[in-house]
Image (tube, rainbow, N blue to C red):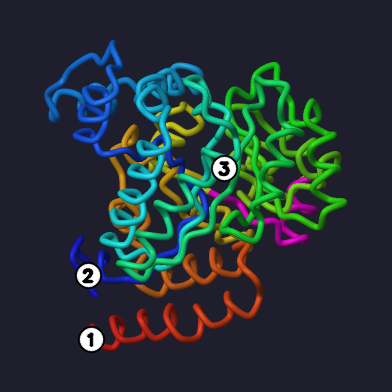
Amino acid sequence: MDLDLEILRQTPKVVLHDHLDGGLRPATVIELADQYGYQGLPSTDVAELAQWFHLGADRRDLGLYLETFEHTVGVMQTADACRRVAYECGQDLAADGVVYAEIRYAPSLMTAEGLSLDEVIEATTEGFNQASAESGIIIGTLVTAMRTSQDSLAVAEAAGRHRDQGVVGFDIAGREAGYPPTLHLEAFQYLQRENFHFTIHAGEAFGPASIWEAVQFCGAERLGHGVRIVDDITFDRDGQPKLGRLANFVRNRRIPLELCPTSNVHTGAVESIAHHPIGLLRSLGFRVTLNTDNRLMSDVSMTSEMMALHESFNWGLPDFRWLTINAMKSAFLPFDQRLDLINEVIKPGYDALIDQG
């Protein structure tokens, strides 16, 4: 079947790794800056600002990539702004065919003007709920702590207070260099005692050591990116892959990899989409999922990520069906709800499109 963007847009999608502050509409950034008196935007022209974010992110370095978030976070310092951004995020994802999304954000980054962690979480939840009511998309949130800060336990406790109001899990994000996940061990131990889900950014800028800490010390259920697990895979003279002990463990335990191909290129984790190890990891039986990471910064959608994989690896609808079911299996939604979405939405949606071909 010859795939185009319109066909791919119709597919039911699941995204597990999407940052709220990395997916604002450029026009919204400008409007919120004007409304709340935020100074310092590089441009107040929508097209120019969008281009600035795209070029700023595409610098092949995670630290430089993260610098672009100064402005998106800067305009998200009020409850109304958080509510609006969350609502628009849900609307944009639904328009792209996403049926289930886990959106992550660090509430501590939105407290500079006096909001509390709980107020940020409540406002964003209200925005997501409004989007869900209007479009039908199901959204769970991952409350995130910054690995460069020392408040991860407080953020984890805030996530726990809202676990029955839309928060489905926890994460740590930010610079990996010098900030291993074990610095936040107390937060992860708290979450384990509370039987609460969490994923950990690991294996994006750093290799197997970061993944090893996240999995073996902290107990990560999923790996945010995890693309550098390929550093623990070697090849013999005949080109046959051999998995190291960590790679074997991750595969055997079915630990999901939240892969974000375009973002991985922009942060320098891989050279290009064509060189991305998602194809290798799939062929070796890893629990691979496809994600956007930061839709504004990397100028992507789930549809465009699918098209990039179609063009680079000739993947078709059966491949994307497999990826989507993988993601739904790996979600932090309750088991019965995951099963319902797989059997009543995802499989029928893909089967109908495949039959058309």
Q: Is residue 140 above or below residue 71?
A: below
Q: Which residues are magenta?
A: 246-258
Residue position for label 2: 7
Q: Is residue 223 left or right of residue 289?
A: right
Is 196 or 277 nearer to us in this picture? 196
Tell me if label 2 and label 3 are in contact, CB under 8 Å. no
**Identity, as a three-letter code, of the amino acid under mark 2:** Ile
Mark 3 crowdedness (10 Å alpha carbons): few <14, some 14-19, many ≥20: many
Q: Which mark is residue 356?
A: 1
x, y percent for residue 33: 26, 23
Q: Residue at x 39, y 51 (%)?
A: 127
Q: Is residue 189 magenta?
A: no
- Is residue 81 visible to us here? yes
Q: Which quadrant of the structure image shows residue 237?
A: top right
- In the image, what residue occupies the spot 76% across and 39% down? 214
- Which of pointers 2 and 1 lies earlier in the amino acid sequence? 2
Q: Quadrant of residue 78?
A: top left
Label 1: element kind = helix
**Alpha carbons under labels 2 and 3: distance apart:** 27 Å
Q: Amino acid at mark 1?
A: Gln
Q: How many marks?
A: 3
Q: Return the residue at label 3.
A: 225
Near mark 2 (Cα within 10 A), the count class, few <14, some 14-19 or many ≥20, is: few
Would residue 250 be counted in the magenta stretch?
yes
